[in-house]
Image (tube, rainbow, N blue to C red):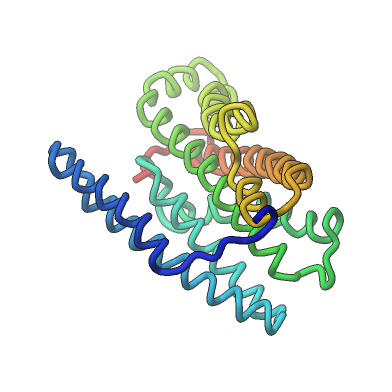
Amino acid sequence: MSGQVIPLGGFELGLAASLLLLAGALSWRLHMGVERRLLVAAARAAIQLSLLGLVLQQLFQTLSPWLIAAVTGFMLAVAGYEVWSRQSRRLKGWWGYGTGTLSMLLSSVSIALITVQVILQPEPWFHPQYLIPLLGMLLGNTMTGIAVAMDTLGRETWNRQGEIEARLMLGEGATEAIDDIRRAALRAGLIPILNSMAAAGVVSLPGMMTGQILAGGDPLQAARYQILILFLIAAGTALGAASAVLIASHRLFDGRERLRLDRLS
């Protein structure tokens, strides 16, 4: 049995779903109020992952660079929306959506392209077996870091308006007046990936390594792939969060270095 992939059918997935229904029933019984969101999220995940499987099957058969580029663009667009939607105080207009999307383009997408062309070097380099899963993991984790960083920046700037304006009146520039808030936002954005790296292999067995082992892969090779992914995610999150915070904090001041909270919604 060792090294074999155990196929999953509808019956096996149904058993897993029954456990989820049990969790929903517990929420209903204890009046927690999360049963509907839990079931909707589960349904969305099942539908979205099933559709992704069908799309990847088609990509593997055609190897069309245009279709792969379209899927990549769609993933980036959805990730940008998720970053925008998770902020309590977000920039108005295009900047609210564009800042996070541009930051992920500069970090996650760039790092994914560098990885497949320089480190992994599949043939062809845009092979979806490598590019799409790699980009998905980078976007998913970088998205969280950027969202947390931008939310912290907007919320803290809004709450500390008086302090920032007082520092500006005392002669400090816009950069100095908001510098400690930017540092706090960056630290907050990096907390998830730092916790993941610190606990990897001791507290948790990361998803990619688990998947490769369940698929019959060599555990040592799986560990090496997981180390690569963690390093890439950390780099992408740091670059993406820094880009987003710098762009957003610059947008919070006008050309005369006056704080413009009217640019936040």
Residue 6 placement, left or right of 115: left
Q: Position of residue 100 (x, y in %)?
A: 53, 50
Label tally: 0
Residue 105 placement, left or right of 98: right
The front one of 222 and 199 is 222
Q: Is residue 237 above or below residue 69?
A: above
The front one of 169 and 35 is 35
The front one of 86 and 71 is 71
Quadrant of the image for the N terminus?
Answer: bottom right
Q: Position of residue 164 (x, y in %)?
A: 45, 23
Q: Residue at x 54, y 71 (%)?
A: 53
One can see residue 174 in this view: no
Q: Residue at x 67, y 49 (%)?
A: 107
Q: Is residue 52 above or below residue 1?
A: below
Q: Position of residue 46 (x, y in %)?
A: 40, 64
- Residue 17: image quadrant is bottom left
Residue extending farthest to the top is 170
Q: Is residue 52 above or below residue 5?
A: below
Residue 219 placement, left or right of 74: right
